[in-house]
Amino acid sequence: MIEVKNLSLSYSNKKQKVQVLNNVSLSVAKGEIYGIIGKSGAGKSTLLKSLNLLEKPDSGSVVIDGIDITKIKKDELRKIRQSIGMIFQGFNLLNSKTAFDNVALPLILQGKLTKSEIKTKVDGLLALVGLSDFAHKHPDSLSGGQKQRLGIARALTTDPIILLSDEATSALDPETTNSILELLLTINEKFGLTIVLITHEIDVIRKICDKVAVIDKGVIVESGTTVDVILHPKHELTRKLIIEEESHRYLEQVSDFYKFDKTDNSHLVVISFIGNTAFDPILGQISHELDITFSILRGELGRIKKMPFGQMLVEVRGSVSQLDNALKIFKQLNVHYELIA
Ligand SMILES: Nc1ncnc2c1ncn2[C@@H]1O[C@H](COP(=O)(O)OP(=O)(O)O)[C@@H](O)[C@H]1O
Ligand SMILES: [Mg+2]
């Protein structure tokens, strides 16, 4: 559905040239929710905008549904842009217009539908996002979550095949974030809409993305299925983003109660289980077999999209060779581990 190949983009000012995207390639299949995660300034927004050429790359190609949009004429590009909806962290709604008119505007501009056809369509979209009762309100009087619902309805008016989301939940509280993510998931499943979203929050990736790419200083440093990348991160930045940062943050939070002392007989390990393994009594068995003990410092059982997983931060007490044996068993059982101290 979307093939980005060797995309590079730079901004030049008088003094210097800043390389914002460096040889970025990625491939998004039809119906997929594809997440791009990275720190602030990594180039996420620029990359997202280059998918519909709101930003023009210096080199490389963007192929949408078989068409290289870097090579087509302006009016062809305009048509393709209509099949790509966009939502933003700051909502980008028109405050002078009602919720209804915000959604209707793209259709009025398009000029293809009659007034009553537009009404049917807009009413349907407002119902889809749960805003039927707010059609005549202005965005100013809506909550953050409602504004984003309205943003989503507006993005869907032209029946896009792709939805681009730039930090759509970053301004929202966790509960509202969840409800918006649920809505995106519903739309993705109901209409087979392909979604590319950028975020700096790993939770957003975990909850709804099928695939993820990690971007750092304009370079994609790692990509793959969400399950693989989250549970078996390869790149240092990804590890930091996902495992180590969370574990270290946690240890800091509980430092009044627990302090880890690194000795030859105590080790900190993060272990991750996926699928059926998540429910197996692995730690108990290993402890029994190898005569070592585990203290579970932090544990999480959850799902990555639909796949069950468990992740634990444990202190292992045992000699280095006992630890090695335990890690060998983890490997045999396909349990991923990360020795963090
Ligand atoms: N119009 C611009 N002119 C010059 N530099 C820019 C412009 N837009 C973005 N940048 C720079 O490009 C880098 C990436 O920006 P952006 O894509 O917004 O990152 P992100 O969305 O990951 O926070 C930043 O260093 C930013 O300062
Ligand atoms: Mg940004």
Image (cartoon, rainbow, N blue to C red):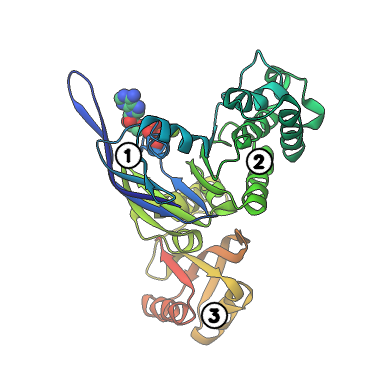
Type of amino acid at the residue the image marks with label 3: Ser
Identify the element where label 1 is drawn. helix
Asked if residue 12 is positioned above or below residue 162 in the image, the reply reads: above
Give the residue at mark 2: 180
Quadrant where the C terminus lies?
bottom left
Asked if residue 72 is positioned above or below residue 1 in the image, the reply reads: above
Looking at the image, is mark 1 or mark 3 nearer the viewer?
A: 1
Structural distance between the alpha carbons of marks 2 and 1: 32 Å
Question: Which corner quadrant of the figure contains ligand 2?
Answer: top left
At a point 17% along the width and 20% down the height, the residue shown is 15
Mark earlier in primary sequence (2, 3): 2
> Foreground: 191 or 255?
191
Any part of residue 86 in sight: yes
Looking at the image, is mark 2 or mark 3 nearer the viewer?
A: 2
Structural distance between the alpha carbons of marks 2 and 3: 43 Å
**Crowd rating for badge 2 (residues with CA inside 10 Å; few <14, some 14–19, many 20+):** many
Give the residue at mark 1: 70
Asked if residue 194 is positioned above or below residue 110 in the image, the reply reads: below
At a point 38% along the width and 39% down the height, the residue shown is 47
Asked if the residue at tag 1 contacts the one at tag 2, i.e. Cβ–Cβ closer than 8 Å, the answer is no
Mark earlier in primary sequence (2, 1): 1
| Relative image position of residue 45 (x, y in whole percent) | 42, 35
Type of amino acid at the residue the image marks with label 2: Ile
Mark 1, ligand 1, within 8 Å: the answer is: no
Task: Using the image, tell me which numbered label, if any, was put on residue 287.
Answer: 3
Residue found at the very far left of the displayed protein: 15
Identify the element where label 2 is drawn. helix
**Crowd rating for badge 1 (residues with CA inside 10 Å; few <14, some 14–19, many 20+):** some
Mark earlier in primary sequence (1, 3): 1
Identify the element where label 3 is drawn. helix
